[in-house]
Image: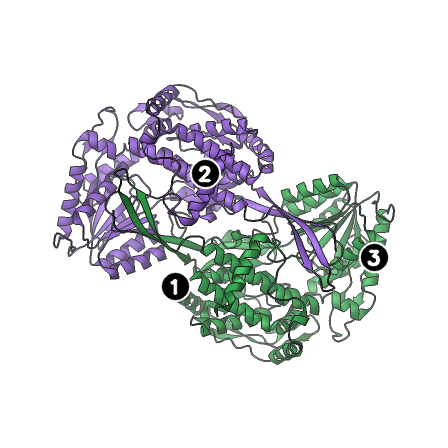
Chain colours: A green, B purple
Amino acid sequence: MNQHQPLLDRALEVLRTREHWSPYPEDTEAYREQDAAAGERAFRGLLRLPFDLDQPGTDGVVGPAPETGGESSPYGFPLGISYPHGDPDVLLPAMRAAMAGWQAATPLERAVVCAEILARINARSHEFAHAAVHTSGHNPVMAFHAGAVHAQDRGLEAVALGLAEQTRLPAAFRWHKPLPDGSVFSLAKTFSHVPLGVSLLITGAVFPTWNGYPGLFASLVTGNAVLVKPHPRAVLPLALTVRIAREVLRETGFSPDLVCLAAERPGERLARRLALRPEVRIIDYTGNREFGDWLTGHARQAQVRVATSAVNSLLIESTADYRGMLDNLAFTLALYSGQLCTSPQNLLIPRGGIDTDEGRKSYREVVADLGAALDALLADDAGAAGVLGALYAPSVVERVDKAGAGLLGEVLHPSRAVTHPRHPGAVIRTPVVVGLDPDRPEQAATLLTEHLGPVYFAVAVDSAEAGTAWLGRAAREAGALSAGAWTTSAEVERALRETCADCGVTLSLNLSGGWYLTQSAIYSDLHGTGLNPSGNTTYGDPSFVTGRFRTVAVRRLTDTR
Amino acid sequence: MNQHQPLLDRALEVLRTREHWSPYPEDTEAYREQDAAAGERAFRGLLRLPFDLDQPGTDGVVGPAPETGGESSPYGFPLGISYPHGDPDVLLPAMRAAMAGWQAATPLERAVVCAEILARINARSHEFAHAAVHTSGHNPVMAFHAGAVHAQDRGLEAVALGLAEQTRLPAAFRWHKPLPDGSVFSLAKTFSHVPLGVSLLITGAVFPTWNGYPGLFASLVTGNAVLVKPHPRAVLPLALTVRIAREVLRETGFSPDLVCLAAERPGERLARRLALRPEVRIIDYTGNREFGDWLTGHARQAQVRVATSAVNSLLIESTADYRGMLDNLAFTLALYSGQLCTSPQNLLIPRGGIDTDEGRKSYREVVADLGAALDALLADDAGAAGVLGALYAPSVVERVDKAGAGLLGEVLHPSRAVTHPRHPGAVIRTPVVVGLDPDRPEQAATLLTEHLGPVYFAVAVDSAEAGTAWLGRAAREAGALSAGAWTTSAEVERALRETCADCGVTLSLNLSGGWYLTQSAIYSDLHGTGLNPSGNTTYGDPSFVTGRFRTVAVRRLTDTR
């Protein structure tokens, strides 16, 4: 098992240098050739069956039918899986009781167990990717990345951060104080780490593992038990995770009840009930602003860490690589049909046009050229289906339809429906680009409201300064996780840097080629700043881990020499 | 100015090793001979005069008369000092505006300025000690330690922790990702730190600098402005601090308005008003539980860090050094008349007596021998005045009188009034020891309630296990910062270690000689755990600093080779 220690050491080193690194290859060629087929078979083998977890307090099932809480693939078929439903009055005390042995282990022992859980998840990455495709609607590449290996990276990052924080103080040492009479007063001191209790993880529908593993592993490595309450549309990726975690915990001599699943019956409002339980001392939540605010206001017995909605903007001011910009931007907008929390929504373009290496381009020309780049990228359905994603919820479809009908503003580039070659039932749409005039109050309100999905606003602003101001305003009022810009002006860049520092948004400048605004390089980038309404946490930062455990000291007289 | 960098490096090293260290000598002999006289003259020179601070928004004065908010020395005379009163509508925007230049400095530059503030405070330690004597009622030794040099240690500890947290990420670096085609994708990345806003420091009456400097310097070094709202009884130590901080900031080219004082008019409820201001994003509070809870519940725009009341216990189970134990305990109880937040209140003693190196001692004998040790320590008034402190508030006097009148339980050792040789108006009392029976509900309620001051309860418990259980219960229900025990039993020690880990209290075992339960070795010990109702912060721990600033990144395309 200690084979994981070099991995953890390397993760800790990289978290200092912030260089590129990943222990979980994102290229499927790094995996065995038969893994892909085995992964698909494993996924198919889960369908239309009860998902066994052997948890305490099981008092019924959730699903398998959609009307009883079963999941449906956004690619057009019900999964038919049922999950055990738990009685919190049995489950939570069992989880609290499971903590004693886990707390008694060393931080390194806990970190190694967590790394083993991740290693087993990694070995089943293709299976996890299929689970991500058929719950969140990812395309296969995104599912393998964000649904599997990058989520594993996020998990190991949290494990390493937790190990670092728990090993900053010596576990035991002698303290010697010279006294005025020349003698030395000595104490034997110890520091021990105390977890807080049960950590409740409430995940969303789009990136349940990528957004869930940080909290899961940060709480687990610091000695807490973790109860996972997944979004009803995306239970499977976390049910698999919980099952693997329980297996590893049992095999390594710990209680499997340190990690449990809380599947929700329709209308049960389970997250609300669990969030107020006295055993629950930490809550990690990904989801809408409204429930995040409710948690913060009501779950006063717990630390509440939230990641909610974002209205991300980018400014197209000038570029020395017009084609590179258009290609990069088109891919960014198409990817997973804009359902990422880091997808840009507002494309701020000076009304008077922009300077490029292909000459001056008017606002209309930029939008038209972007539309052409989207058309080229998404020309045939099979290729488009590999870049876009299925729309994961009816609300996303409604949003696209509304925008496409011109109800938000003038449609500058229409969306079209894509027919998936293998899944005719999948609802897949190309991006719609709507023109908004920020001087019209109802259109200004639209651009300050999150429209998750392939709905983009081309916003004609008076100047680069005005665009920068709108970027900042959207972040401050509606929250933002990413900001982008193309500019060759040092002055515009300086103003953007200042604005993004002030409103707490990661700024990406002049991207072209193989890296996109929406991407976060784990172990290098931070995700979230806590400085705007998009959330109060930062993945990849020590503050994500500190506070999940506390330290208690004992001082004991030794000898006075 | 950079002479402070070696000091900061050493502080960071010691925070890793946790060895004994202090850059601010606690022995007055380390200071120049004339310092003591100069310090007293400087203090005398402040009396009966307005205290000038040159702050923006001054709209009147507080004091000098006690009925208009002026301070009175617990040693029996009014200080006659008046302080400027500020208009928050002017003061807070000025403080927010002052942050721009401070934020633009590097973490090391800010840390060096903070170290210079502390160096100047250190050079005036005798003056600060006099200020502590005549506000909080410290005796001269305690005033020089907790009121001056140890508070400075706490301050530098926070500066060093803040510097460490702000230098964990590289400020700027290149990130290179190998692409499948053999090329390398590169980004230039920067991380910059963003402070939260105005940090409000609300200090108490007994240790305003020791409890105040951690929050003041942790917020300042991380780029925030700090508004200091002192307890009306103990303004002077912080007014001096603010004045020195403003001097250093001005001299080093920063805005002095980064540190301001908010003196309070009687009945103004200033802390409530300031705590809800949108500019205020961090609050550090030392004081009563009730207002701490109010802050946590109402100041939702801010991070609220509180240190409130504590009911500390110790268990006297057995000892191999009965005399050493009695002497150590008597000094612990006498010191500053039990007005420390770490003073023990409940002395838990098995009803059936204890084993010692002087044979078996009954419960009554232990209490009587402790009384004799107190009498010996406090035999003459001059000597007693050097160990005890003046009672800092009428409420403390009332508490001692009530206990001494037998209203809480049987008086086992009476308190007596001490006449200070130089200050006949000082109210000084020796400890009163009251016997409590935990089986009587009203007496059990008494031992679960904080009685700050020289009121101690000798509690006859059924067994060591019962005593350990009471120690844990008091901590869990009423909060605790320290726990002590004398025991020669490995079994009892093991149970105590477990209980203290569970209820989050620092445990001190078998102390004798020159170290006391109430003491905290700065740079080595942590103060507070956040695990029980005594507070949610830990001085000396990275978690005290993380969250006071956030990090924002910029990623910029370089060249793709």
Q: Are marks 1 and 3 on the same chain?
A: yes
Q: Picture coordinates of residue A207 (x, y %)?
A: 63, 63
- Relative to A212, say whether A46 is above or below: below
The residue drawn where x is 48% and y is 62% is A221
Mark 2 sits on what residue?
A: B7
Q: Which quadrant of the structure image shows residue B183? A: bottom right
Residue receiving disc 3: A371
Q: Amino acid at mark 1?
A: Ala
x and y, in percent, of residue A44 in the image: 64, 79
Element type where label 1 sits in the image = helix
Same subunit, tags 3 and 2: no
Mark closer to the chain start, 1 or 3: 1
Q: At numbered mark 2, what does the secondary structure look like: helix, strand or loop?
A: helix
Asked if the residues shown at circle 3 and circle 2 are in contact, with their CB atoms under 8 angstroms apart, the answer is no
Neighbourhood count class around disc 2 (C-alpha, 10 Å): few under 14, some 14–19, many 20 upward: some
Q: Residues within 10 Å of mark 1 (few under 14, many from 20)?
A: some
Secondary structure under tag 3 reads: helix
Distance of label 3 from label 2 (alpha carbons): 60 Å
- What residue type is disc 2 on? Leu
- The three-letter code of the residue at mark 3 reads Gly
Position above or below: A174 against A334: above
- Residue beneath disc 1: A104
Q: Position of residue B137 (x, y in %)?
A: 31, 31
Q: Is residue B438 left or right of residue A525?
A: left
The answer for which chain carries disc 3 is: A
Position in image of residue B64 (x %, y %): 40, 22
Q: Which chain is home to disc 1?
A: A
